[in-house]
Amino acid sequence: MRFEITQEYVSDSDSVEQAYAGEDLYPTLVGLPKLGGIQVLERVESGATVNLRIRFRFTGHLAGAVTAVVDPDKLTWVQETRHEIGSGHASFVLRPDHYPDRLRASGSFQIEANSHGCRRVVAGEIKVRAPLFAGRVEEAIVSGLREYLEAEAPAVDAWLID
């Protein structure tokens, strides 16, 4: 399932880009809907490139039919993101801690200035391999991601203003 989600920020694009490429923002995002257990595992900076590895846990509700196939406690993954500082561009891959044969996800985002501050467009693809339930699981993941990202943008702005 392909997806595209746009976030709007009142902060400028350089500040938003630096926030996402740093380590300090992520612990402040715990408690937003659908995702939790956010933990920065590694940050490596090399010239204008920053590579981040961050662990996430899906905390949203899943239908009983889905939990019959997938243990909700095992819905954790490491997001590996490569930020190209100065361009506003980053690419990411999700590496499941469990069920690596059942979930594949990757994508990119672009941060661009606009008249209100900036926007970030997150686009990617999620592919779930689960007989009979793949579409429902993909929809639940994208729905949860959308809800999380809608709550994330104001939290990032608030963190930048503090």
Image (tube, helix red, strand yellow):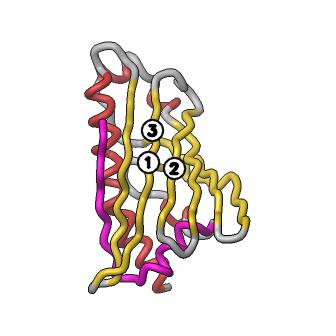
- Report how far apart the C-alphas of labels 1 and 3 lie in the structure: 7 Å
Q: Please, what secondary structure does the residue beneath circle 2 have? A: strand
* Residue at the image point whose x is 72% and y is 60% from the top: 44
Residue 95 falls in image quadrant: top right
* Residue at the image point whose x is 37% and y is 67% from the top: 120
Q: What residue sits right under mark 2 in the picture?
A: 92
Position in image of residue 65 (x %, y %): 29, 19
Mark positioned earlier in the residue sequence (2 or 3): 2
Mark positioned earlier in the residue sequence (2 or 1): 2
Q: Is residue 50 magenta?
A: no
For residue 96, side relative to residue 136 (left or right): right
Q: Please, what secondary structure does the residue beneath circle 1 have? A: strand
- In front of the other: 143 or 82: 82
- Report how far apart the C-alphas of labels 2 and 3 lie in the structure: 8 Å
Q: Residues within 10 Å of mark 3 (few under 14, many from 20)?
A: some
**Magenta stretch in the rendered image:** 1-22
- The kind of residue on which mark 1 rests is Gly
